[in-house]
Amino acid sequence: MARFLRPLLRGTTYTRLLHLWVPVLAVSVWLFIDMSTPWIPALLLVPFGLVPAVRRGEGVQARLLLTPGEPEPGISEAPSATWPDRLRTVLWLELRMLLGAVTALATVWLPVLCFELARCAWTGGPAGAPLLDRLPAHRAWALLSPLPLLALYGVAVGLGELVTAAGRRLLGPSAAERLAALEERTEQLLERTRIARELHDSIGHALTVAVVQAGAARAAGDPGFTDRALGAIEETGRAALEDLERVLGVLREAGRPVSARPTLADAGRLLESARASGAKVDAEVTGAVEAVPGPVSREGYRILQEALTNVLRHAGAVPVRVRVSVTGGTLALEVRNPLPGPIPGSGRGSGLRGIRERAALLGGTARSGPDEGDWQVRAELPLG
């Protein structure tokens, strides 16, 4: 019983009723002017719903009254951007008016019906309601008087749930809005992962070196060794500060919209930055890079950035060959540099793992490792 009555204790039940009542008030004003044309308000909703800003207003109202307090109600607050959005808004307005009319009739006549059944049973006279004036007077009608209240309960709760489901369907995000939100979420997750890797690799390494060097200097008791240890700590700390500044730059960039973040069309600044660090960069770009889809172009930029950063961090100012090509529905990125020392393993660092993760997220592949005396990073991303 308590579970059955629980909806009556929720404020959402009554805010949804209020939401259903709002269009009925507008219709009542029109009926007060001209009762012979009750269909005019429904007709006026068609051009009204085609206005882009109406969808935003309906979305805000639906969020406040149909889904109060829900963090992810599934209702958009953006204006209509396409004709399907406008048509869905028109359908929503018509449905809202229809459900509002049903609600208004039920909330007015069902309590009246309950009262008349009870009055007929109590006084023994015929009921005054038009639907009951031909029923014979009998006290057994008292047993039926709770039924209109149960029906009212069903209308209040059921239509509230129905209009909320319809709101999520008709006022929910369009395909373009869902794609933009998914892209934004993916970008945020990628940036968080990258920041975590950067902090772990640079700051964690610097602190480890500083602790080891300080402990060794104290244990050695040699002024010359102590000076060399302090110099190493200073150099490591300076490098860590530079890495930290770069990571903070990523954090500051995270507040920008996805569409404003760098793409492969901005790769020139990456190459100039590498050249300014002393590397001799030989770059070659083939194909229509500017036509690469946004998500692929942005991830390609990040992959190229990570590959160049790894070159400068691990190989220093060495010749670097960069190849970017768009052919056959695939974006190919290749960064090669000569190995400065012994050939390392297959590349298990966080930066290289991040490159592979970015490529896999877009359905592509990435590999890194020694190749003909060079270190090679190559990624292939599908454009579809």
Image (cartoon, rainbow, N blue to C red):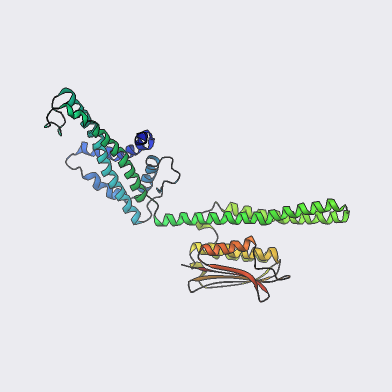
Q: Position of residue 341 (x, y in %)?
A: 73, 70
Looking at the image, residue 308 lies above or below residue 162:
below
Say left or right for 59 vs 348.
left
Name, please, the residue furthest toward the top.
123
Q: Position of residue 160 (x, y in %)?
A: 33, 41
Q: Looking at the image, can residue 213 be seen?
A: yes
| Residue depicted at 69% across the width and 63% down the height | 313
Say left or right for 352 vs 48.
right
Say left or right for 130 vs 329.
left
Foreground pick, 51 / 368: 368
Foreground pick, 337 / 200: 200
Image quarter in which the N terminus is found: top left
Q: Where is residue 303 in the image (x, y as percent from the top left)?
A: 58, 64
Tell me the quarter of the picture where residue 122 sits: top left
Q: Where is residue 334 in the image (x, y as percent from the top left)?
A: 59, 71
Foreground pick, 117 / 370: 117
Looking at the image, residue 69 lies above or below residue 217:
above
| Residue depicted at 43% across the width and 40% down the height | 69
Name, please, the residue furthest toward the bottom.
372
Looking at the image, residue 152 lies above or below residue 126:
below
Tell me the quarter of the picture where residue 70 sits: top left
Say left or right for 193 vs 32.
right
Numbered label tally: 0
Q: Looking at the image, can residue 277 be seen?
A: no
Looking at the image, residue 76 lies above or below residue 106:
below
